[in-house]
Image: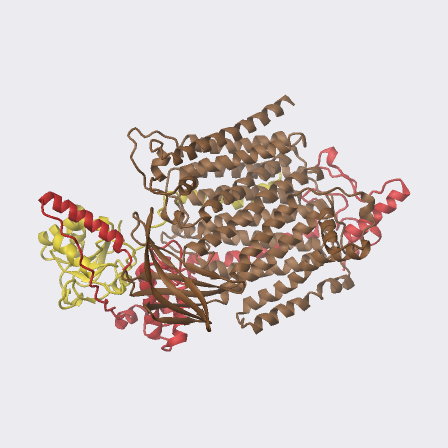
Chain colours: A red, B yellow, C brown
Amino acid sequence: MGSRWQATLRRGLRLAAVVLALGLPLRADTQAATSSEPSEQPIDLVHVASVVGPAQGPRLTAGALEAEAQRVGALLRCPVCQGLSVADSPSTMATNMRQQVRDMVAAGFVEEQVLAYFEASYGEFVRLQPPLRGVNWLVWLAPLLGLLAGGAIVFFVLRGPRGGAQTPVGPGPVGSQGSVTAPVSHTAAPDTAVEADALPDDAELARLVLRIREIAYGWPGGVRPRAKEQA
Amino acid sequence: MNRRVLVAGLAVTLPLVALLVVSLGRDPHRMDAPLVGRPAPPFALRPAGGGQPVTLESLRGRPVLVNFWATWCVPCFQEHPVLTAGSRRYPDVAFLGVVYEDEEPRVQRYLREQGGAYPSLMDDGGKTAIAYGVYGVPETYAIAPDGTIVDKHTGPLTDGRLRALVDKARIGAMVGQGSQ
Amino acid sequence: MAGWAWTRRLAYVYAASMIAANLLMVYALLARDFSVSYVAHVGSRAVPNWVAVVSLWSSLEGSILFWGLVLGLYIGGATYTNRDRHPEYMPWATGVWLACAAFFSFLVAGPAQPFLTIPSPPTDGPGPNPLLQNHLLMVIHPPLLYAGYVGMTIPFGLAAAALLTGRLGHDFLRPLRTWLMLPWAFLTVAIVLGGWWAYEVLGWGGYWAWDPVENASFLPWLTATAAFHSALLMERKGVLKGWTVTLILATFLLTILGTFMTRSGVFNSVHSFTQSAIGPTILVFLAAATLFCVGLLATRVDRLAPEGGLEPSVSRDTAFLLNNLLFVLLTFTVLVGTVFPLVVEATRGTQMSVGRPYFDRMAVPIGVALLFLMGIGPALPWGRASRVQMRQALLPPLAAAGVFTALGLLAGVRHPWTLVALFCGGYTAQVTLGELWLPVARRMRAHGEGLGAAVSGVQGRARRRVAGYLVHAGAVLALVAVAVSSTEGITTEVQVARGEAVTLGPYTLTFQGVDQLSEPHREAVVANVAVRRGDRDLGLLQPRMNYYASQREPIGTPAVRSSLRHDLYLSVLNIDPEGRSIGLHAMINPMVVWLWIATLVMGLGGLLGLLPSRRVHAAAALAAPPAGEGLEAAR
């Protein structure tokens, strides 16, 4: 297998140590490893069934088998890698696990059974997708709750504050009496108070300001639309 | 003081910070041992060097100690003498080695040099390791005479720890967690 | 004013001291001076010089020192460019910056001290992690990442200054935007470069695994992007000042959270530095900074009075709000998913994982929604749109949407989300390209200019706008590329004997044998795989297995043959040492190159937006084309 080089190095060092201690001549290790092709153990279907129950799906072959094995492999975490799925990891453990998945799928076990088998050995850790039980519900519901909460906040921001609001009352907010000139903000320092919608005295400048407001804000005629005009 | 902002801000940030404080010192690589208290998965593996396959079934009625190891693993090398001595000291306990991700000729050479007092089995394809939830070596399982896993030890064994495992295996099925 | 002058000097002194310290460390690394503790930790005589320099940021203590360098450069630069401007904000901002700098200096001086003297120095060291020696990207990715990450401290200081002084006027928006955009551009490129590095080096054929540390870099990017859009709305309407500031504060806090996640050893990640005592210290800083931010917001946010209001309408304003909603939702989702295993362990005591399948499932709908919003927003006018305006703006891009989807179907795309992404991508592409092209076309017509002059004129006059749409164009390309490459690839894993061939898609791959390679820091076995397509010989691909002295499992390097259409990706799972057979993992990943190109476009757009452009006379602006386009704020 792959790690011959370090093993050779380590073996050589150990041999050298032994030899030096005994004063025997070094015997060059020229033996090529006659690694007989390891006969892989077939999976023990009886044991697997005892853990996850009888196979619930059809036996798959060829293309369908590979596709399903790949799909299920992507849901299993390789225990020795950092966060990679069994389908993605190049490590030996992951390769063995992929073979196990393939064998189980070929024997007709469905995705949930395959995941349950590995969970029985390794714990919930080995599932990349949190199963729906107990406190795990939180992680599945959190995005939805976030969306609802966020949506509510956006809704309230758009609606604008209604009387005695916490958020600073800016000049002429929508939903108030819709006056063109509005009270000065009562929480801000004086130099930040802005009188909205006020026009300069010069007529030409006022015309230009109205035109700018029309272009920039889409206000018809440059005048802020009143609350009840909203469609 | 904008109370709404204060409450919202604290509500969002305090739980997160508290969670991180509580999680300090957590070992992200520690894994649960859910098999403790469950029946030991059966296996039928051939010993390194040849011979008839050894099954867990055949050892029913005796306490068993299964040690997953490899020649390339330094802590396994450290615990090897402990296990060898232990197999002699506790003859009623069946000691078994299961080789993890290794090659037979290397294993044979290792056992010749270091001495092997009990059979080491070749787990080709790693299915037994998967069944036992092994994710590193060395890992040792203590199995009671009725076939239940009573304890799991991750990491190299010391004499003391080995003694504890043997005691548990002898007593029988005990409710307990895996230990480091 | 004397106080401000001294603050500036201190900022420059900090920058100078960080530069000096880092130069010293680089010198020690190059000289292989093993009496310095950090060099003894990561140095090695066996590695080439570029690896020795790169070791500066490869391990924890050095990375903190490097953090200080980047922070020093940023603080020095930001202080210098603003030395004569915004006198009411700058002292506060610089104070906040230097407070952060003080913390990181404390780390360097204390818990993460890299300059300790070793009484009896070893003759050689172990060298940095082999994974970090595998690729040249290790030289580029961390500095860019730090430039993005650390740089978020600058807008943080500016935002804090706005809160501390109790105002956020139009004049201050410019430095805020600039100093948010600069780190953002770096961070964007850095995140994708990290993905490219994973793709080229790790061998599993993907570029994003939702690893906790990857998420840590992604979270501040999300809030920074949201902050940027919020700032745009603030500039237009004078609203959402408090919210924009909150987002910028959150971005900084997320960078500190990220650095905690990477360095505390609490999270299971391939990027984690080894566990150390530095975690609790960073956590204390995070807690203090968080309380500071919350307190500051609670007491001061009311001072930032809005100068306008928002109304519920179908308009670009609402699109901006939805943009913020979606970005913050994605941030929240990724954050919850990343820390959830900690929650479970704290409550139930068991280990569990929240991995890629979960994040993909959550991120895809949000990403597609954002893709669609990127098209709808710019199409709509500011302020309330009439029905006619809406129809004119929103309907035409459906044409490109249809075309994209049809092309996808023709190409064999069947995955539902990918088709939706193609639809939205086409829609947004038409809007974005339209926004880029129409001003040019109008100018060519109105002034009779040629294409080049028109483009130059438009980007000179409305540079920020062009830059923004350029970034959007890149983002569309990136999102579509991600959608297609994640779902439409094919893969096979097979044991191949020498001389044997295997087919994958249009390719025939023949394993021809292995070569041995000996490099100073590693041994390698290279597999030669001949690639043919039909009857065309496309040469050799050479995936390899690298063996390092300090590791048991070898680390493979994949071989990738890229083209615009797809990548042929080969990696070796195992090699029989005599070269009689290999375990080959072969993949065809479509449209991956487009992701890298898109990132380049986004980065360039970001940098373009940073360049100052000419001020335009107000009268010329008023004479501009009719309503529906909005007033182009030329700055």
x and y percent of residue C576 in the render? Answer: 28, 62
Q: Disc count in the image?
A: 0
Residue in the image at 62% along x and 29% along y: C91
| Left or right of B133 on screen, residue A225 | right
Please identify the quarter of the rendering in which residue B127 is found. bottom left
Name the one closer to the observer, C588 or A103: C588
Looking at the image, the residue that sits furthest to the right is A203
| Left or right of A136 on screen, residue B162 | left
Residue in the image at 43% along x and 64% along y: C539
Please identify the quarter of the rendering in which residue A75 is found. bottom left
Residue C533 visible in the snapshot: yes
Name the one closer to the observer, C504 or B26: C504
x and y percent of residue C32 in the render? Answer: 36, 35
Please identify the quarter of the rendering in which residue C617 is found. top right
x and y percent of residue C349 in the render? Answer: 36, 51
Relative to C217, does residue C388 appear above or below in the rendering? below
Name the one closer to the observer, B121 or B56: B121
| Left or right of B42 on screen, residue A52 | right
The quarter of the picture where the N terminus of chain A appears is bottom left
Relative to C255, does residue A69 appear above or below in the rendering? below
Residue B78 visible in the snapshot: no
x and y percent of residue C25 in the render? Answer: 42, 33
Relative to C593, does residue C158 appear above or below in the rendering? above
The quarter of the picture where the C terminus of chain A appears is bottom right
